Image: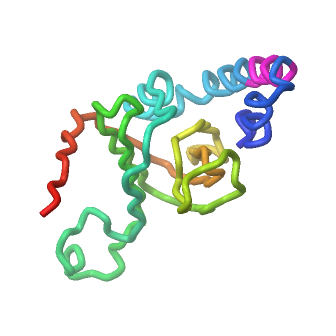
């Protein structure tokens, strides 16, 4: 993360918040300028997502990484083991709990997951990702982009990709479990 770092997030939630808030505002403007420069290079759905969707305070409910995440059967596409292509899928519940976002990355060149990461804020007894904090998209080189996500636990996800799309759907209601 270049603009919305763990340290800056920690600082804006500390007594030094005035100085950190000013730095945050400067970084936000710098990030918007950088984003506007790369948006035309992204596909239509990617532009729409990175320009207008905020998953702040959302919940990562699932992360899938594999050579054939769309193949539900245990056979290879066309019987050719060399037809594998790595993909990444993130399923994120909105902060309000009313929408589910499916983020899909194709033509992957790098994936990194740091979990539990450097602890940012007090969490429950067990480590978890915590809330989706901030994310940034940047250009690595011509046609290759990086999406980085920082969670309130300090966990991070970094994905380098060429193609990105997303879908949004109403979240399934959570039903209470009955005790027997």
Q: Taking 15 as reference, is 109 above or below it?
A: below
Q: Position of residue 17 (x, y in %)?
A: 81, 23
* Quarter location, residue 93: top left
- Number of numbered discs on residues: 0
- The residue lying at 53 percent from left, 26 percent from top is 40
Q: Position of residue 155 (x, y in %)?
A: 61, 54
Q: Taking 175 as reference, is 32 above or below it?
A: above
For this view, does 10 lie left or right of residue 134? right
- The residue lying at 65 percent from left, 48 percent from top is 122
- The residue lying at 15 percent from left, 55 percent from top is 178
The residue lying toward the viewer, choosing from 28 and 17, is: 17
Q: Taking 142 as reference, is 39 above or below it?
A: above
The residue lying toward the viewer, choosing from 176 and 22, is: 176
For this view, does 159 lie left or right of residue 62? right
Coloring scheme of the render? rainbow
- Residue 150 seen: yes
- Residue 148 seen: no
Indicate the quadrant containing the N terminus: top left, top right, bottom left or bottom right: top right
- The residue lying at 38 percent from left, 49 percent from top is 104
The residue lying toward the viewer, choosing from 36 and 132, is: 132
Inspect the magenta stretch and tell me whether residue 20 lies in it.
yes
The residue lying toward the viewer, choosing from 168 and 67, is: 168
Indicate the quadrant containing the C terminus: top left, top right, bottom left or bottom right: bottom left
Inspect the magenta stretch and tell me whether residue 136 lies in it.
no
- Magenta region, mostly helix, strand or loop? helix
Q: Where is residue 9 in the image (x, y as percent from the top left)?
A: 72, 35
Q: Which residue lies furthest to the front in this view?
A: 180
Q: Give the range drawn in magenta.
A: 19-27
């Amino acid at each position: 993360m270049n603009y919305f770092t763990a340290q800056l997030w920690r600082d804006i939630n500390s007594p030094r918040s005035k100085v950190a808030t000013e730095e945050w505002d400067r970084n936000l403007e710098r990030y918007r300028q950088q984003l506007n420069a790369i948006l035309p290079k992204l596909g239509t759905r990617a532009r729409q997502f990175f320009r207008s969707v905020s998953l702040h305070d959302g919940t990562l409910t699932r992360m899938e990484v594999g050579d054939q995440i769309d193949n539900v059967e245990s056979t290879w596409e066309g019987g050719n083991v060399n037809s594998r292509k790595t993909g990444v899928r993130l399923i994120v519940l909105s902060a309000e709990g009313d929408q589910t976002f499916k983020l899909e990355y194709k033509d992957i060149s790098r994936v990194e997951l740091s979990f539990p990461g450097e602890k940012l804020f007090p969490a429950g007894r067990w480590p978890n990702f915590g809330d989706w904090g901030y994310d940034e998209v940047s250009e690595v080189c011509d046609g290759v982009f990086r999406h980085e996500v920082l969670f309130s636990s300090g966990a991070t996800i970094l994905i380098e990709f060429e193609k990105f799309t997303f879908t949004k759907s109403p979240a399934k209601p959570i039903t209470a479990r009955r005790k027997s």
